[in-house]
Image: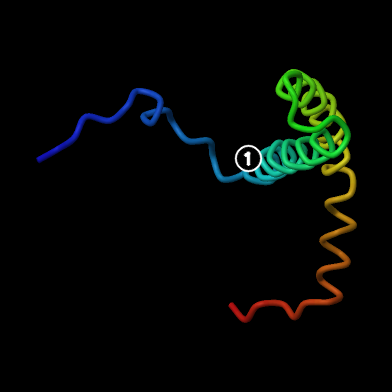
Amino acid sequence: MSRARHPLLQLRKLPPSYGRLVTPLVLSIFMSGIVSAVVTVKGLGLGPGFLTNWLSAWFASCLIAFPSLMLILPIVRRIVSTIVEPSAR
């Protein structure tokens, strides 16, 4: 028995070479969302304006997070390579 798939799930996947761009993009979206939510709760509490304030902070954070991540990722990779043994392939 075959189930019908949602049309959005049938989108073509990007080629593997895009992984180097998509990974930091998705990571920056999640991390900036989490961090901005924590800071917004700490600063303003979970009041009536939380969602509006958080979404505004999240948008601003995303504008900074992705380019920052792209700039520091090579440095982080070098640091990690000095700390972690390479995998045996």
Which of the 4 quarters of the picture holds residue 28?
top right
Which of the 4 quarters of the picture holds residue 40?
top right
Residue 36 horizontal/vertical position (percent): 80, 36
Q: Is residue 17 left or right of residue 15?
A: right
When the figure is inspected, residue 52 is found, relative to residue 86, above or below; the finding is above
Tag count: 1
Q: Hey, what amino acid is under mark 1?
A: Tyr
**Mark 1 sits on what residue?**
18
Residue at image x 88%, y 40%?
68
Residue at image x 65%, y 77%?
87
Q: Is residue 2 left or right of residue 18?
A: left
Q: Quadrant of the C terminus?
A: bottom right
Residue 45 horizontal/vertical position (percent): 80, 33
Closer to the camera in the image, 44 or 64? 44
When the figure is inspected, residue 80 is found, relative to residue 16, above or below; the finding is below
Which of the 4 quarters of the picture holds residue 58?
top right
When the figure is inspected, residue 32 is found, relative to residue 76, above or below; the finding is above
Residue 16 horizontal/vertical position (percent): 56, 45
When the figure is inspected, residue 6 is found, relative to residue 13, above or below; the finding is above
Question: What kind of element bears circle 1?
Answer: helix
Q: Quadrant of the N terminus?
A: top left
Closer to the camera in the image, 69 or 50? 50
Residue 27 horizontal/vertical position (percent): 70, 44
